[in-house]
Amino acid sequence: MSSSLQVLWIVVLLCASILAYAAASAVDDCASFKLVNVTNTVVTSRTFYKTGDNVTVVNAVQSVSKNDLPAFCRIELTIITNATANSSAHTEVWLPEAWNTRLVTLGTGGFSGGAAVLDLAVTAVKQGYAGMSTDSGHQADQADGSWAGPHNDNAIADYAWRAVHLSVLSAKEVVKQYYGREQKKSYFLGCSNGGRQGLKEVQDFPDDFDGVVVGSPANSFDRVLASIAHTAVLILPVNSSRSISEDTWTNVIHPEVLKQCDVLDGVADGIISDPRVCSFRPETLTCLPQQNTSTCLTLDQVDTLHKLYTDYYETNQTYVFGGFYPGGETGMLSSPPALPVVIDAYRYMIANDTTWDLDRFDFSAILQAEFVFSAQMNADSPNLTSFASGPHSGKIIHYVGWAENSIPAGGSLHYYETVHSWMRANVGSIDMDSFYRLFPVPGMQHCMGGFGPVSFGGGSQAGAGYPALKNDAEHDILAAMVRWVEDGVAPEAIIGTAYKNNTVAEGVAFTRPICKYPATAIYHGGDVNKAASFRCV
Ligand SMILES: *[C@@H]1O[C@H](CO)[C@@H](O)[C@H](O)[C@H]1NC(C)=O
Ligand SMILES: *[C@@H]1O[C@H](CO)[C@@H](O)[C@H](O)[C@H]1NC(C)=O
Ligand SMILES: *[C@@H]1O[C@H](CO)[C@@H](O)[C@H](O)[C@H]1NC(C)=O
Ligand SMILES: *[C@@H]1O[C@H](CO)[C@@H](O)[C@H](O)[C@H]1NC(C)=O
Ligand SMILES: *[C@@H]1O[C@H](CO)[C@@H](O)[C@H](O)[C@H]1NC(C)=O
Ligand SMILES: *[C@@H]1O[C@H](CO)[C@@H](O)[C@H](O)[C@H]1NC(C)=O
Ligand SMILES: *[C@@H]1O[C@H](CO)[C@@H](O)[C@H](O)[C@H]1NC(C)=O
Ligand SMILES: *[C@@H]1O[C@H](CO)[C@@H](O)[C@H](O)[C@H]1NC(C)=O
Ligand SMILES: *[C@@H]1O[C@H](CO)[C@@H](O)[C@H](O)[C@H]1NC(C)=O
Ligand SMILES: *[C@@H]1O[C@H](CO)[C@@H](O)[C@H](O)[C@H]1NC(C)=O
């Protein structure tokens, strides 16, 4: 053997043994991990997964079964949230070997009830982030609120804010003690109730995060319940003169919406870039005498649509909640999918009466919700100065589907505008763009889905079959946040992707910029399937 070959062999053997040692020590580090100095937190389980291992985890809310993940250590925690009450949260912290030095907290939708294990896998570990997610203090289906009753104050506080906050503190300690150094930056990503969790943290615990990405937030929680109940009252019971079937939404109303609104952005492609510029007139669909009612609308249905597409004000003109924008009809059902959440919130948290039902919903029920639980549940304070101007110079990216079919997009615009006017009145010259950017997504329904550039790395999208085209700052909203926080480059637009039939395997149908509010994507020529053919104006 020549001497150079000998040297090569020695190097190869050395590398192999270093790798073997590193792998063995990673396994040992995980298996023997102890958390010290965190008195409210018990490590209940440690599991090391090698690259490509079968990772199968199931809980009440999410499940993951993957064998394409890089090596990571899964730490499960029980966090005592109130020792007197013996209340606790189950929290997961997933720690990749090839760590990108960041921590991301992943939010949970509905009533929460289980850590977002799928998102921990595909959004955190797969991209090198250490990830944390919590069940918010109870284990149950996301639509089941019975754990909160009868008015279990500790369980409600855990769900409202406490479990997430305490989990962030513990996760930061886990990261520090596992890797031997603190995370460089701490991020949040979540949609719906997850969006509420992110904004609650921004408002109450401004030190927890450097960058928070929130989607379709249920941040005015009491008003969101009210808007869903209001929708239900307008369209139920099924088969009444005012009820609207899925068929009618999709095949009668949606085509008329497109006819009136689609071309206003310069291209008739089934996507409404900005529905605010369209004054949709549902009365054009009113049935003529003798007309077959499966092709037109009754007067009651027309009236329902007018009410659904309008912001809701109390008689004294006080704003209560925002309306839907035209465009989301194909996602509308004959009964609102989130109605069980509303009914359980009233039964177990607000009215303390397990017989409460929709027939008891009226304006006084809205006030009752506001009175009983808005202080801990809502995240609608416009004062964000501690987060934005504090030591973290925190950043917020907020997105919402223009075609929202569950939490009306009007609420997102209202919150953004409320912060804007509050800042102007109280902080003078502050520039919203320096810390808070809103991105309404053309054609997107609640958190994902719809007809539009709906895949861009938003909360839970990747796991649900809507992955970003690339995990870079142009196409992935979390990567855009990282670039903003770490490099000071703020996003003007995110390029969203539409897969053919919303199916990744069928390939890309088109890309399109998702513009920073209040700008809109307007076609200026070229291939309509390319983001570059649109400008944000
Ligand atoms: C735990 O606390 C003790 C006493 O404050 C300190 O000396 C030690 O470094 C801490 N250990 C860790 C891992 O933080
Ligand atoms: C992975 O593990 C789960 C549960 O342990 C099992 O049901 C599944 O069949 C396994 N998948 C593969 C591909 O081995
Ligand atoms: C902890 O629980 C006890 C018993 O339910 C309650 O009295 C107390 O107010 C709770 N403390 C906090 C901080 O929630
Ligand atoms: C506290 O709750 C745990 C389950 O979370 C239970 O195992 C334990 O027995 C409870 N302790 C007391 C004193 O009730
Ligand atoms: C509504 O009407 C359809 C068609 O007549 C019928 O199949 C369905 O059962 C009815 N639904 C309810 C809830 O009454
Ligand atoms: C109304 O139209 C529907 C769908 O086009 C059809 O199935 C139904 O038979 C028609 N009803 C009447 C009374 O013509
Ligand atoms: C309007 O009515 C709401 C609910 O009754 C009340 O809270 C609010 O103070 C009123 N606003 C004005 C301006 O009177
Ligand atoms: C439900 O219980 C909570 C806590 O005990 C209380 O604050 C609230 O007023 C009750 N609601 C009603 C309608 O009595
Ligand atoms: C905004 O909140 C901070 C604390 O979070 C407080 O110090 C400040 O006074 C508030 N600003 C106004 C104008 O209320
Ligand atoms: C979508 O799927 C349907 C059948 O499910 C098929 O007919 C259609 O061609 C597909 N469209 C695209 C754009 O792939």
Image (spheres, rainbow, N blue to C red):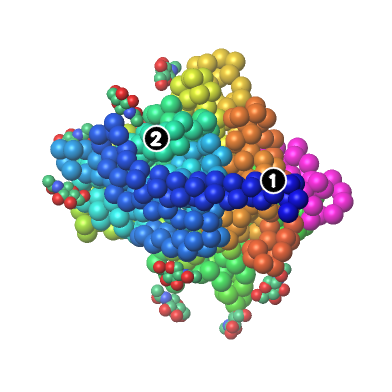
Q: Quadrant of ligand 5?
A: bottom left
Q: Note whether residue 485 is visible.
A: yes
Numbered disc total: 2
445, 397: nearer the viewer: 397
- Residue at far right of view: 526
Type of amino acid at the residue the image marks with label 1: Val
Please say if 515 is above or below 434: below
Question: Dot 2, crowdedness within 10 Å: few (<14), some or many (≥20)?
Answer: some
Q: Disc 2 marks which residue?
A: 177
69 or 472: nearer the eye?
69
Q: What residue sits 57% from the left and 69% below the top? A: 248
- Residue flagged by tag 2: what amino acid is it? Gln
Q: Name the residue under label 1.
A: 7
The x and y percentages for residue 410 are 54, 43
- Asked whether mark 2 lies closer than 8 Å to ligand 1, one says yes
Q: Which region is colored magenta?
A: 515-537
Q: Is mark 1 on a helix, strand or loop?
A: helix
Classify residue 66 as left or right of residue 472. Answer: left
